[in-house]
Structure formats: C-alpha cells, structure tokens
Image (cartoon, helix red, strand yellow):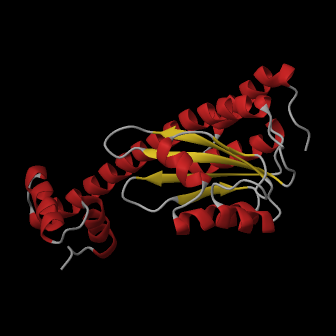
Amino acid sequence: MPTIDPSGAAGAFARLAVELHDAAGVEETVDTVVQFALQALNCTYAGVAFHTRGSRAEVAAVTDPVVAEVFDLQIDSQDGPLVESMRDRTTVLIRDTRTDDRWPQWAAKVAGLGVRSVLDVPLAVGSGPSPSVGVLGLYSPEPDAFDADDEAIAHILARHASVAVASARHEETMARAVDARKLVGQAMGILMERFDVDDDRAFAILRRYSQDTNTKLRDVAQHLIDTRKLPS
C-alpha cells in the first residue's frame, strides 16, 4: 500500500476527516484510523488501545494479529512503551527492539515476532472525572523505520483520531440515552394501563425497583417490556 507524499498530506487528511465523520461508531472510527496509518506512515502494522481509569486497557483495533500480541504482552505485564505512553501521555520511539534496553524482556519477545521499530503516540479521548486515554501504535519489521516526518504525521493522525473517537463516543452515548428514554416510556405505559396510575406514579415504581434491585432503570424497563413483569 503506497505511503502518502508529504506534499499531498493536507488532501489526504481532508479525506480522512470525511471518512471519520461518516464512520458509523467507535469501532468503525478506530478501524478507519489504523487503516489510514498504513497508507500515511512507514509502518507495516498499526493498532489502537484505550484505557479508562479503574479498568484494564483494551485493544480497540489492529491491522494484524501480531499487534494484538504486542499490546497484550504489555497489558498483561503493565510494562512497556504502550503503558508509558498511556500513563505519561508522551510519544515513545523505539528505533530497534534488538538494541533498545528500556524494556528488555518485552523487546526480546517483540523482536521475536518480527517487529523492529515501534512508534507509540498518545490519544486523549473525552473529558470528565474518568477520561479515556489511548495509544496509536505503529510497527515495522525494519529497524529505524520512523523518521521525523513519520512522527509529525503520526501526531496529526493522533489528533484527528482523538477528536473523532470522542465524537463517536458522544454520539453513541446520546443514542443509548434516547433508547433508554424510549424504553422507560414504554414501561411506564404498561404500568399506567395495568395499575391505572399516572405517569409520575409509574416512573416512581420503576425507580423504586431499580433502587431495590440495584439494577439500571433502563434494564428494569427492558425486563418489564420483555416479560410484562417487574424484577423479583
């Protein structure tokens, strides 16, 4: 797959912006990002991983199974350039896994997989008390594969990806909220008809069952719609 000439980078990123806008959700968005990375940079493999505070980092997209293995080695051990890039939100460049001595055990395993050059670029996704952070990982079987131009383009791609993923997550959250309101409305209608109560009373019944059973209001509503019964 041909790489992008720096002189045509502006047009390429404009096309990327359109593709990211048209992506159907988060999964499709990150897939678009990693596929674009193969064209825009001197890499053979690419992937994206995300981490939210209090949870385990997750592999979001990869262009080859070898990337998932490279990620998992670090997620399991909590050590490696991916972990450092996520934690410190810094770019990490490994020119040759056979000679870099910062993470010797991980580097030896990755070199054994045929990966020699690594470029990890942080992604900042979302805001609030528990924002997600991520990493765009770029890999090549050739040593010293990434130069200053690659790093600059990777940072531009990471910024595009950060905005696009945050937007896609927001849209998915809004869609779930709309869906939840619809479900609650349907469940309230069932209660109002069955027990001859008004909408305030119907909502109070749903909320009480949600609290008493420690179940999300949406799930209580779904259960009632599916079974015509409230949770035990």
Can residue 68 be spotted in the picture?
A: no
- Where is 93 relative to 152, above or below? below
Q: Position of residue 216 (x, y in %)?
A: 26, 62
- Residue 47's x, y, as percent? 68, 52
- The quadrant of the picture occupied by the N terminus is top right
User: Closest to the observer: 178 or 107?
Assistant: 107
Compared to residue 69, the image places residue 178 above or below, namely above
Q: Residue at x 62, y 67 (%)?
A: 73
Total marks shown come to: 0
Identify whether 58 is placed above or below 199.
Answer: below
Can residue 146 be seen here? The reply is yes
Asked if residue 205 lies left or right of residue 94, the reply is left
Judge by depth and name the residue closer to the eye, 181 or 86.
86
* The C terminus sits in image quarter: bottom left
| Residue 194 in the figure: left or right of residue 46 | left
Q: Position of residue 109 (x, y in %)?
A: 72, 68
Residue drawn at x 88%, y 27% as measured from the top left: 5
Against 158, residue 181 (above or below) is: below
Residue 214 x/y as whole percent: 19, 68
Residue at screen point 30% across, 76% down: 227
Q: Quadrant of residue 191?
A: bottom left
**Between 43 and 88, the one nearer to me in the picture:** 88
Single out the residue that lies furthest toward the right: 2
**Residue sitting at the far bottom:** 232
Viewer-closest of 41 and 85: 85
